[in-house]
Amino acid sequence: MAKFGIEVKSVHYTLLMAQSPSELFATSWTLHRLSPLYHTAESKRTLLEDAQALSMYANRLRDMLTGDTLHGIRLSLDNNSLLDEALAKAGSLKSCRWETLPTWHYWNEERSLLEDPDQETLTITAEQSAGILVTLEYETIKYKAALLCDPDGYHTPRDDDATHLPLLVTRMPTALRQAFLAFLGINFDARCSVLRLPSGFLCSCLETYLATLHQSVRGRHDDREVIERVMKEVQLTLSFNAPVAPALKSVEVSLPRQSLSELYTRGLDKSEALRTPASRGQKRKLGSNTSGISGTESPTPFISALSDYFRTHLAMNIDINTSITTTTIRTPEKHHIRLTKIASGAFVIGFEGRIKLLANPGRTILLDDSHIDEPDAEDLPEDAEEREKRFIWKANEELLRALVARAAGSQSQAERASMTNDIIT
């Protein structure tokens, strides 16, 4: 195995074998918010640093799912009959593995140094880890779950005998998922709930993804081609509250790739116009069409252009980007139209707490923002291709980072103030 020159300074930097982060792609995940995992009795370190603890929990989960006994204590679940029925066609459980997931940045960097990336396995520290991958391999099918931290790596202080992995994603039948969640509750005193994604958050995810792709070719004549190539056709699901039209629950808006890039370009032009000194005051007065992926304000060119199109051609006001930060207790606003699903060639995400990552650009060297310069018109085609790959990875990281932040309960001051006012009133 290749050596990477990693210096082990203390027991807190134990090297663990890692799975490829590509395991997160091409899988329909159910999103959950997960409380800290407390494991004082079994490990004084984070689970990301303790290979022995991961192996122990893998064996314990396997024994519970198979109904085996340990020291005379039966480990099967109360709903074992439902579990057996759900897994009847899957066959017997062949293996149960708990393995660390490297960050995309570290995986790409280290994979470039390996002679045969498909055959060699990475070893990583907690700071280079994005979470834990749980794999349940049955005879005919494989089920997965991932406990994720920030895509930049695990940097939570290690002073509370707990591991903080706030985002849990699962790919399992309902009965097996309930069994796994019960296992987390029994062994880690963990609480789990489905992570719902409101309309404003979905809009921010789409806007941030488009903005990152656009940044990869800023200044080039083919700036629309990258968006069209990565996002492909986009389908938006708009859902309506009952007072609007009791018989109308939702509308599917299908955007060909050319229409998507055209609307985004049109929205960018409008945003540039709003940045002129004469219009800044008017923009603040309007107080709309701004929302950040984690609660901070940022322009939303695509949603603005789409709203303008609906207003002009269909006489329909779709204020789908409004979040709690754009309303107040004194002047409540009723919003009857919500964005509930985004389906594209890059990702699929829905308000009910579902996501599927599709844009896997392949291996490349990732750079941080300080090393990403303006594209040079004389760049070779292969340089432009590598730059595009880096920004696709960056867009994926931004999306995952937003989900982790939401699962961790990150809220803006406006959101917290509004919630406080609700309690007081």
Image (cartoon, rainbow, N blue to C red):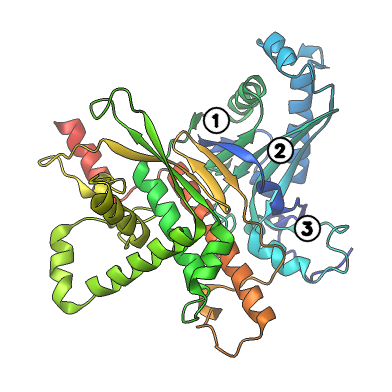
Number of the front mark, 2 or 3: 2
Give the distance between the C-alpha atoms of the residues marked 2 and 1, in whole angstroms.
16 Å
Give the distance between the C-alpha atoms of the residues marked 2 and 3, in whole angstroms.
17 Å
The quadrant of the picture occupied by the C terminus is top left
Amino acid type of the residue that numbered disc 3 sits on in the rendered structure = Thr
Give the distance between the C-alpha atoms of the residues marked 3 and 1, in whole angstroms.
28 Å
Along the viewing direction, whichever of 55 and 360 lies nearer the viewer? 360
Q: Residue at x 71, y 17 (%)?
A: 86
Q: Are marks 3 and 1 in contact (CB under 8 Å)?
A: no
Query: For the residue carrying disc 1, how many other residues have a C-alpha within 10 Å: few (<14), some (14-19), or many (20+)?
Result: some
Is 337 situated left or right of 191 in this image?
left
Mark 2 or mark 3: name the one nearer the start of the chain.
3
**Quadrant hosting residue 365:** bottom right
What element does badge 3 sit on?
strand
Q: Label 2: which residue?
A: 134
Is 174 situated left or right of 11 in this image?
left
Q: Are marks 2 and 3 in contact (CB under 8 Å)?
A: no
The answer to whether any part of residue 290 appears in the image is: yes
Is 247 situated left or right of 171 in this image?
left
Along the viewing direction, whichever of 294 and 326 lies nearer the viewer? 326
Mark 3 or mark 1: name the one nearer the start of the chain.
3
Along the viewing direction, whichever of 6 and 356 lies nearer the viewer? 356
Residue 43 is situated, as x and y percent measured from the top left of the image, at 68, 40
Query: Is the residue 327 above or below the residue 14 in the image?
Result: above
Number of the front mark, 2 or 1: 2
Query: Is the residue 69 above or below the residue 30 in the image?
Result: above
Q: Label 3: which residue?
A: 123
Mark 2 or mark 1: name the one nearer the start of the chain.
2
Residue 259 is situated, as x and y percent measured from the top left of the image, at 44, 59
Amino acid type of the residue that numbered disc 1 sits on in the rendered structure = Ala
**Quadrant hosting residue 146:** top right
Residue 35 is situated, as x and y percent measured from the top left of the image, at 50, 36
